[in-house]
Image (cartoon, grey):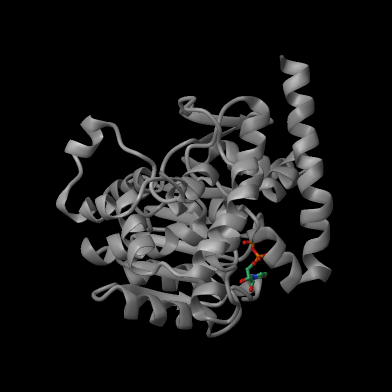
Amino acid sequence: MSFLGPRPLTPTEAAAVPPEGLVRFWIRPGIVSAYRLRKGIGVAYKTEYQLDHEFYYRQSLGGDIGLLARAIPGTILGKHGIADAAPTLTFFGIDIANTSMNEAIDWIIGRTRMESHSQICFVNPDCLNIAYTHSDYLKVLLRSELVLPDGIGIHLAGRIKGTPMAENVNGTDLFPRLCARAAAEHIPLYLLGARPSVAMAAATAMQAKCPGLQIAGTHHGYFDPNDTAAVLHEINSSGAKILLAAMGAPRQDLWLAEHREQLLTPVLIGVGGLFDFYSGAVPRAPMWMREIGMEWTWRLLQEPGRMWRRYLVGNPLFLYRVWKEVRETG
Ligand code: UDP
């Protein structure tokens, strides 16, 4: 046994390892691995075998030191024990689906085949702080068909409530996986939002990554309210089955809720600033930061003027409100 390496397997688990996982037997088992860290923080979207494979073939002294350094914050912040995840996480009356990335994508794909609309919102502490005082946004979250948990703040709040978050199903990590599934199943997407040309650049980048991906159309998110009818017409005539609106929360979610009956698109998703990341306009936090739940510090450093209130005031305020809710409701 060594300090770094995949967790030791029971004889039953070892007998069930598939051929693509055999590399695991060439590595000495250990206490700390990338999979364990990511699982604890809820970002283990790759399988244990894929991460073992990366560990074996890309191992370096620098990589090992980095993994050791991340083990301390990762272990403190990560999930402890094996408590089963409840099906929902509820904060201030808002039910958040406590699901996995794959299940959420299956659900969304299934909804593209329905006649009725499905609205999906991602919520982070900032969104829940807004909903605390913004009754229209609260109503949208309560009426949406699916609300998904975004980020370390929800993970920590789940720990305060004693209901661990199963996985961090945030829009930024969901988007490329959804594009891959949509490409495989020939489901057209429409990208609405961000500054002019950003949605188009994100579409081009995703089409390069997911051959066959159909982008039915794109439009920036700074249109005049007088042009709303024209934008709705463009989306409807595109034939898109999934509309991704990236105009920031709560603007995008309110817009989708207000216009859902005029839209022919069955699946409506508010996705925040992610076109900026996938277009290459704004770099996303490196994986090592995400592994220890510190993506928010990256965004804070990128835009301190806009983000300080959201993170430095908003995050503690949200956790305080959750703690208060737990105390009051028992
Ligand atoms: N945005 C937009 N229309 C607006 C205001 C904002 O399309 O009227 C875009 C903006 O360009 C950015 C995204 O909405 O791409 C909001 O990003 P932010 O980081 O605030 O979103 P979050 O993910 O935090 O909700």
Image coordinates for residue 234, horizontal then vertical, percent: 43, 73
Image coordinates for residue 148, horizontal then vertical, percent: 51, 44
* Left or right: 193 as drawn, with respect to 6: right
Q: Nearer the viewer, residue 327 or 116?
A: 327
Residue 307: quarter of image: bottom right
* Left or right: 203 as drawn, with respect to 296: left
Instruction: State the residue at coordinates (29%, 32%).
Output: 10
Image coordinates for residue 158, horizontal then vertical, percent: 61, 33
Q: Is residue 151 visible?
A: no
Instruction: State the residue at coordinates (38%, 69%).
Output: 58
Image coordinates for residue 89, horizontal then vertical, percent: 56, 31
Relative height, residue 269 to residue 165 (above, below): below
Relative height, residue 38 to residue 181 (above, below): above
Q: Nearer the viewer, residue 89 or 284?
A: 284
Relative height, residue 88 to residue 207 (above, below): above
Relative height, residue 80 to residue 114 (above, below): above
Quadrant (top left, top right, bottom left, bottom right) of the C terminus: top right
Ligand 1 is found in which quarter of the picture? bottom right
* Left or right: 57 as drawn, with respect to 36: left
